[in-house]
Each structure stands twice: as structure tokens, then as C-alpha cells.
Image (spheres, rainbow, N blue to C red):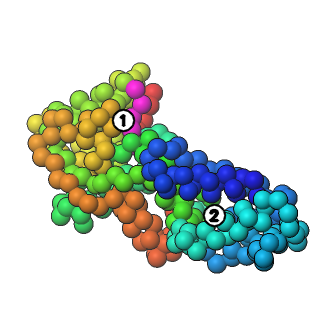
Amino acid sequence: MKRTVVFFSVLLLSLSMGAQQFAWKTVEMDGSRTGCSAPGADNVEEALGRVEGRSYYAPNGRVYRKGSVPRVAATVIAAQPAMADLKQVVGFSERGMSSRGANTPLANFATDAMLESSESIFGVRADLAILNSGGIRASVPKGKVLKDDIVSIFPFRNYVVLVEWPGSVLLNYLERQAVRYPQPVAGVEMHIRDHKLVSASIGGKAIDPDAIYRLVTIDFLLGSGDNMRLAEGARDIRRTQVLVFDVIMDRINALTAAGKTLDAAEDGRVVFE
């Protein structure tokens, strides 16, 4: 039960202080002494056992009547109804999706979802999408995917915005990104050699410095968030109350309803030499 207690202590502390103050990570649960496993929405007793009076009956048949174990078990079990919504299975992933960096499966999945949602949110389709790696806090597990997994991956209250950029501003941003390591993108193809931008195109066409491009992103990146400052040089900015979490969940629900898995792959949108 040890790791279970640590998990719930951190969870309760994070709820009281705000999740954005914590680094999220997945910890394998150690149920070797009790037979406990991570519970779903409808198997709490099977996964965690039960408490009767002052006795805790563990899933592996062991009974604890002394010490703090029965009290801790009672606290953990009592918390489960409030967490039932998070334990819903929302999809299935055949391979899982890793999280950090540009052109990783999860980064591509998330930015593609942002780009695809732009027309329904704003009435016009954006030309490209940009997110930040730091806003993607975990990976999609292989197998069943819970709503809890998606909350852990996108825990912050970041709102969707649409930014209009001159092509010259967009090219300047991409050139700065090439110097370090690009953030997740969709809709734009970048070719980088020795930390310099060799070429950049949208829809197979080179970016025109004099054209106007629509960028869908999150409000956190408009200012100093991750030092990206996407509001600088913008001709127009349209804000919403739509959370990036909701955009991701909408895409997951659509894929699951269509019988499709939650999988993506690395592709040629960012090429390094």
C-alpha cells in the first residue's frame, strides 16, 4: 500500500495548492504485500480490498487489524467515488504515445487536434498549430486509456487562441526555434540543418513573408510562457474559453466512437540534418 498512500497524499495536496505547482509523473504501484492494483471506476473492492470495522481485508486475503493500515485503506477507498469520473476508459492505444519534444507521437497528436478543431471554434481553419512541450506532462499508456491519463497529460487551464501573423513574423519565430529545439507544431513543415532553418512551408508552399497566416495556440504562450511570446508581431488575437484539454478529449471521443485507436507516429513535419 505504500506507493498508493504516497499517490493519494500528493493528489490531495495538489488539489489544495493547484496542479500547476507540481511536476506530473507516472509511478508504478507496488501491491506486492496486499495484492492491490490501480482501481477502475467499477472494481474498487477487487483492486483495493475492503474495510469492515477496524479491520482491512486486502485483495490477496491478508487481514490487517493493527497499526495505521486500516485507517489509510479506509481513506483511500472512501476517496474512490469522487474519482470515479477520472477512472472512465476513454480509448485504447495499441502502441502508446511518448510525450516530449517536437515530432513525437503525442506532440503530433495534440497539435493535429488543435489544428483540426480551429474551424469549429473560430469559423476559419488555422494554417498551423503550435504547443509547448512543457504543457504535455506525461505519455499516453499502451492499452486502455483513462480520463485520468488525459488529465495528467494536460493538467493546466490553458485556453485556445487564434493569432494572425505576417509571414515575416512566422519565419522569424521558426528561425529562432531552429537554433534550439522546435516546439510541437502541425500544419508547417520545417527542414533544419546545423540549428539553422533551411526551409519552411505550409501546404507544400514556401512561407510568404508578406502573406498573413493564422496560428492556433494557447494563451499561456502569448506572453513569456516558455519564453515563446507568440503575441509579439501579431496583427490580431482571438481568445476563447475553450481549454486545450477539451480539444484533446473531443478528438479522443471522436476516434473512440469511430472504433479507432489513440495512436500517432513521427512524420516528416520537422526534419533534422
Tell me the tag on residue 158. none
Separation of marks 1 and 2 at Cα, in angstroms:
32 Å
92, above or below 175, in the image: below
Residue at 32 percent across and 32 percent down: it is 227
Checking the image for residue 143, the label placed there is: 2
Q: Determine whether, in the image, residue 38 is placed left or right of residue 257.
A: right
Circle 1 or circle 2, nearest the eye: 1
Quarter holding the C terminus is: top left
- Decide if residue 199 is in sight here: no
Residue at horizontal 24 percent and vertical 63 percent from the top:
121
Q: Which residues are magenta?
A: 180-184
Type of amino acid at the residue the image marks with label 1: Asp
Q: Which residue is mark 1?
A: 226
Quadrant of residue 199 within the rendered picture = top left
Crowding at dot 2, Cα within 10 Å, few <14 / some 14-19 / many 20+, comes out as some
Residue 187: % across, % down:
31, 48
